[in-house]
Structure formats: C-alpha cells, structure tokens
Image: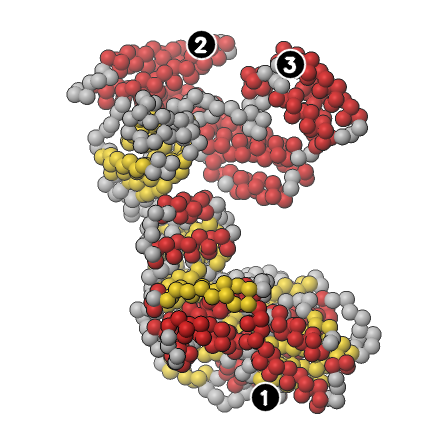
Amino acid sequence: MLNIINQVFEIEQKLKARGESSVDRNLKRIYHELDELGYKVIDPIDRPYKETDTDIEASVAGNFNDNMKVSRVLKPIIYRIADSRNELLQKGIVLVE
Amino acid sequence: MSNINFGIDLGTTNSGIGKYENGRVQVLKNPIGFRETLPSVVSFRKGRIIVGDKAREQYLSNAGNVFSAFKRKMGLNDRFLVNNGDGIAELSPEDLSANVLKELRNYVQDESIDAAVITIPASFDTIQSNATKNAGYQAGFKEVILLQEPVAACVAYANLSNLDLDAEKNWLVYDFGGGTFDVALVRINSRELKVTDNKGNNFLGGVDIDYAFIEKLLVPRLVAELGEDDLWQKLIRKEGVYSKLWYYLNYVAEEAKKQLSVAEKTWVEIDFPDMDLFFETEISQADFNEVVAPKYRESESFILELLKDNHLSFADIERIILVGGTTYIPYIREALKETSGTIIDSSIDPSTAVISGAAFYAGSCPKTVVEETDKSTKYEVVSVFDVKVSFEAHTNDLEELIAFKTLSPFKGFYRISRLDGGYDSGLNAFENTASEFVALLPKCSNGFSLQILNEAQTAVFNQQLSISQGLYNVSGQLLPEDICIELDSREGGTYLDVVFKRNSILPLSKTIYKTFSKTIAKNSEDFVIINVVEGKGGTMPGSNLSIGFIEISGAVIQDDLIQGTDIEIKIAIDESRALVVEVYIPSADQELKKVFNISKREVNALKMIREIEDAEQVISKEIRDSDAEEAYELSGEFKLIELQLQGIKSDLQRIVDDNATEEKYRLDEQKRNLLKKLDELTRGRDVYMALNKYEEAKDYFLTHKDQATPNQQQRFQKIIATEKEFLQSNDKHLIGRFTKELSALNNEVFFQNDENYILIFLQFKMVEPENYNDYPKVQKLFDQGEKAMENRDYRQLKHIVNIIYSSMKEDYRKRTYSETPELNNRRGTSRTGLK
C-alpha cells in the first residue's frame, strides 16, 4: 500500500508542477478512500523545520538557521490511524532550506 | 541469578540493541520512528539533546553542534565543545557514546536494564576498550561485558544455523558498513571462538559507493543536459542551489540502488524544477557494478593482506560471514564468492548481525551485580516526587503546550514523545518547572509520554497523556446536534447517515461520495434529493430539521444520471452556521453549489407530504401489530398520531404553491414533533432488534472462527474494533450496516466449505414445489444432487445448489433469503435517489 500511496503522491506533485488541475477531484477521491482505510497522508511542504518532528527525514541544504522550511517533499508522511493507537508508517522524505 | 540478556552494537555509524529471551534474540525497535538501528550521532542545541536520525540530519549544516563518528576517537584526549544551554561544556568521546547508550536503554520500555554486553572493534586496544566500558557505566549500566564485533557476528551465525563445529575452522568476517570496513579472521571450534587477526579502513564504507554513484553515473548525464562541466565540483562544494541538488541526487541514487538490487535495469528520473531540469535516463546493473567494483577491490586488498600475514589462502577459509548494510549489494556478494570460492553466508540480516550476536552472548552471561529490582522483572517507574502536569486535553490548534512542575526541588531532564512516533522533544535540561509545545496530528487523539529523568538520565517519573485535536473543543463552538444526509435504505424508506457528529468543532467540512440509486433521464421530471438534516443520526428523517435541501431534477442536468454512478457532495458549515452544499456529478462533469443560511428555514411541502406518507405506512403496520398483541393503549397512541398527520397532510396539499405565508413552517414544526413522537415509540424496539441481529451474527462467526481464513479473521477484528461506537449509537441503520458486513463475512465462511452445501441442498428439498419455477427440472436436479452426495463430489453439489436456487420463484427467494446478500440482490423503492 505504501508504494501505491507514494506513486499517487508523485503523480500529484508532477501535475501540480505543470499547473494541471483536471484530475484534482480524482486525487482528492483517492486520498478520501485512503483515509477511509485508515491511512492519513500528510504533505509537509512549507512546514517550518523542527528537530522535534520525528515524522520527517530531512536533508538540510545550506547553513542551519531557525527559519528553515521544507522546500521539497520526495515522499509524504503516512500514518495509520486506529482507535487503539496511531502509528507512523512512513517518514516523509524532504529537502529543507 | 539472572543473565545479562541485553546486547548492544555501539557502532561508528549506527548502533542497536537486542534482547535474548527463551533461546531467541529480538532486535529492539526504536520507539521513536520504529527502526532497529540508531545513527550514532548526537546534537546539542539550546539545551536540547537529540540522538539518532534527527541529529544526523543536521550534521553538515549545523556542524558545530552535532557530533558523529566519535567512536574513532575513543580513548583519545580529544574533547568536543558543546553548548548545553548553561554554557559551553567539554565532552569526551566516552560522554557522547554514553548518550547513544542511554538512548538505546530507552528502547527497553517495560523492564529494568542495568547490565549489557557492548561490542567493540577487534582492533580496539585496552585504553579504547576501557573507554567503551566507562561509557557504559556512565550510561547507567552497573555491569558491562565487552565483546569483539567479529566474534558477535560469528556467534549470531553459529546460533542461527545448525553448523557442525566438531573440527576447528577458520571464518572470515567481512564487515562493510556505512562508513567503515573491517575484515577479521576468526578461529572457531565446538568450544570457543577467537579473533586471530584483523584489518580495516575507518574511511571506506557504503557512503563512498553512494558518492561514486552520483559522480560516475548521474553527473556525466547531468553535464550533458546542463552543459556545466564543473558540476561535480559545484555539487561537493554544496553552494546555493547545488546544495539542494546534491541532497536530491542522494535520494535519487538511493532509490535507484534499491531498484537495481531486484531488477536488471531501472529508469532514473531527475525532476528538479529549481534548475528547470527534467529528464529520464536508464541505468543498468552493469553500470552500477562498474561503480562498486573499485570499492570492492579496495576491500579485497585488506582480505588478501590478512590471509598473507597469517600464511593462509582462501582454501583454508570455511566460510565468509557478511556484516554491514553495504553487503546487500549483489555485486559484492558475487565478487566475493568468485574471488574466494568459499561459502558466503548471508543467512541472517547483515545490518543487525552484530546486535544479534551480542544479545546471544548476553543470554549466556550471568549477571554478577546485585540488583535491587531483581525481585521483580517488571520495571515500575516510582514517582519520587509529585509532579503537576497541565495541558489542554481538547484543542483545535496543531500545537499544544504541556507545562509541568515538581512540587519539591528537582534537577535533571525531561522528554516528551508522541506515541505514534511522529514527535520527540529529545532530552531537555529541567529544573523544577518546564513547558514544551508539542506537535499534534490533526483530527485524532494524540497519545504522549512525559518522562522526567534524574541527572544520570534514569527515568523517575513517567506519565501518559492524551490530547485530542479537532475532535472536541471546550472553548470552540460546538455543533449541538448531528448533521446528517438522508439516504435511501435497503428496506425502501430513507435513513439518516451522519456526516458530522454532535460536539464537533466548527468550522467543519467534509466530502462524501455516494452513488445514484436510480437513473434520471435528462429533461425528465424525475429528480434526486439532497437533504441535509440537523438532528439525531438514526432517528426518522422527517422528525428532524432540514437545513439544506437540493432537488436535482432532469431539467437541470447536462446529461443522464445513471444508476450506480458516483456523486460527490461537499458539505461545509462555518462558525456562523452557514451551510454550503457543493455537488459534483463526475459522469456529467457538472457542478452545483448552494449556500443555505440556516436562519431562513427552507421547507418543501411535497417532500413533507412524502415523509408523512412514509410514516403512515409505518403507523399502519404498528397499529396492526399492537392490535394483534392486544396492546390497545399503544395502538391508540399510533392512531392519534396517524390522525394528526393526516390533518397536516391535507393542509399541506392545499398550500403546495403557497410561498407567501408562513403556514408551511408551522406545519413543518407540527409534523416534526409528531414524527419525533412516532420515532420514540418505535426506535427503542428497532434498536434492540438490530442489536440482537448483530450479536447473532457475531456469535456465528466466533463459533465458526476456525473455518475462517486469516484475511476473514482480520476483517472480523476490524469490525469488532469499532463496535463500541456503533453499538452505542442508538442508530438501527448504523448497527444494521455492520451486521450486514458481518453476515456477508459469515456467508463467505459458510460457503467456502463445499460440504456446507449438503445442508442447503437438504433445505431446498423441503421447499414446497409451488415455490419453484420448473419443478420437474428441479426434481432432476435433486436426483443429481443425491448422486453427488453419495460420491462426496461436493463441488458438483455446489454447482447443483446454485442452479436450484436460481430456479426458485423470486418472491419466495426474497422472502426467505433476504439476509444472504450474495444470494439476493434486494432493492427498495428509491426516495432520495442516493444511497
């Protein structure tokens, strides 16, 4: 399932980069269905970089400072939401600047 | 006296901990991030100590505060200057190693750990070994046993493989890690394992292969694309945009390497908008092997030297044991096999082999320290002082403050981690009082663990707490009633499906996906109704307040609406309670949007009439049933409601076209009150019956659990996991939905056993002939079925049962097998046009 989610996310990123919005609804629907299955997919783009966020694996470009942000998301964060206990299934792979 | 049982691989690049229990070893996972290995990297920033992945992230960009590879400096006088929040402190390699060891101790959540076997390289001298031991004591271990890494690896292999060790043998341990390479010659017999010699390079590892992949395979192709001949120099200088490109290429290389370990070729896609760069290129395993080969040859030269020094050849080596993540590369394994001609043993995970071996060894080492907690193996954190913890349990923010203070003076550390692994504060200096903003996962309950540790970093207080994000909020605006949408029920009427639950925080927005339960031709007078209702989910739709009503008729649609196709409905309510309903019909690519101001109630007389007609049907059945049971008082109550509803209906018929007066609002109010009363009279019993049906279905599954496949058992557990919520909902439709799911599961379990068809076959034989369409034909089928039973040909019997079933008259089939969804595709009359 994680591979499928990553592929959907990658397709979404490519379409976004090309300004293509005709399949937005279909993507939204896919994320909705994933949500129903208990998968919460989070795109951390623009999130301020914090060393306490253990749900991302960051490559930090440039000199470290307090205003760094996630500038590129290569893989999204994926949680499995359950009544008893939530679980981090995949850390987001990101570039931070 | 118990054994040590815990083994630690304190590596240059990565570390890990394993536990021996009942003859088996388990490599423990990091509770934060759930990985088995922990990068041996420590960062200090603004009083916060972080060990592992998050520290490694900052290694290059925040070099002054992040420390790694300190193992190479063990036993030396080198000191690292650290800003620990109180000022600048000098830390030794032992101090930093102790931090890694303390972090690994944290992996052990539910028992005490005061002794461990810690591995060291075979090349470590006495001073380096003692420094490692000191780091262990500093980390809080009362007893530390050292074990050489190659020996640990051999122990792991020897214990996990049934090897014949009668004669003395020579093994080579080939350890190619992320940053270092070691090769050791080990002599092994039935009694002992001994490292006789070793060689290595502290600056040869997997990371060199990663860089070579970028330099030799990606950069030349990028140069051709960009025309920048000095690209490699720019990348390694990591200036400006090239720094970002460098990290991006590292990711691309990592993904490509994964692909090439399973496929001959892979397509690599470079998509880097910052430099307007997009192209694809193919890389083969042969290309990759060319990159790996020089690094392999470098490692091979150490092996040859080691053998020469010990007057041995490969013929004297019984097997080569692989250790370290780099040995996953197929070329390395193949080249090693070709060069040596001996057994290459990769039967256990090379990246955790040393941890496993250390834990196996620990399982055989008796503890010599006397420990107070030995009486009870369960680790209980005793609160030595009172701690007052305050936080907002329900919030709408994505960060929340947790504040805490000790009621008596205390100095040490605190650490807050989210139980799902997505947040970790790291270790923070603590004196009497502290507070921390913690990140929350939206729209769910977030569990946290708050730990307070003494100066030796041993936990003295541990509390779990929970913060709900976006679920409830005491200070926000709450939704006073459920918001539901009216849908067609299987039985023919309608029911309310909850969209937003009562007490959710405004604003709210949700997209739901439904299907059309009937076909509506373009330009026809037929229509679909979207009715958004405020009230209790599970009650009669007409007894609640309609707050948004959209009729999509044949006149407004651009194309026919086909039964079974989807409709997307977005429902949003803002803080001022304005309701926005947006509808999108994918098959017609048509959008409709309507904003409702709830202060202006919209009611539709024709819909009200239909609701009353539905209720009348329910009432006549109730009157019949109560009369039959001689419950005349109850029957009287139903008759009264019926009478009043009839009055309202005739008033409504008079004012269908009246949009001027407020008469229909008055009638709507009356109708809702009456339907509410009707609902109260019938709902308790219906819910009771729905609950009974659910329990029956659940019992059936539990008694036949052994016949269910693992997948079916998993589906059953999934339903059971949510049962508390729907069983308490008081909503017969919701309970019914889950009962239906369970029944479908039960049917699957039943029908997957061909022998069960005997029972069905015998039942079919008892059915009266008039209930079959072509009885003579059915009789022949009965004869064939008897034969199939005699021959125990259950597959044939199954086939015959299915034909007999299809020969049954439809109304009888529906009446008798309505609870068998696979056998009966029952459908009620469509009211809303949505299901």
Vertical placement of B736 versus B506: above or below? above
In terms of secondary structure, where does tag 1 sit?
A: helix
Q: For this view, does B144 lie left or right of residue B729? A: right
The residue to which callout 3 is attached is B774
Query: Where is residue B784 drawn, in percent x and y?
Result: 75, 22
Q: Residue at x 37, y 82 (%)?
A: B88
Q: Quadrant of residue B712?
A: top right
Q: Quick one: label 2, few (<14), some, or many (20+) residues within 10 Å?
A: few
The residue to which callout 1 is attached is B127
Q: For this view, does B190 lie left or right of residue B73? A: right
The residue to which callout 2 is attached is B632
Q: Which amino acid type is shown beneath numbered disc 3? A: Asp
Of B276 and B436, nearer the camera is B276
Of B668 and A71, nearer the camera is A71
Q: Which amino acid type is shown beneath numbered disc 2? A: Tyr
Q: Quick one: label 3, few (<14), some, or many (20+) residues within 10 Å?
A: some
Measured Cα–Cα span from mark 2 to mark 1: 97 Å
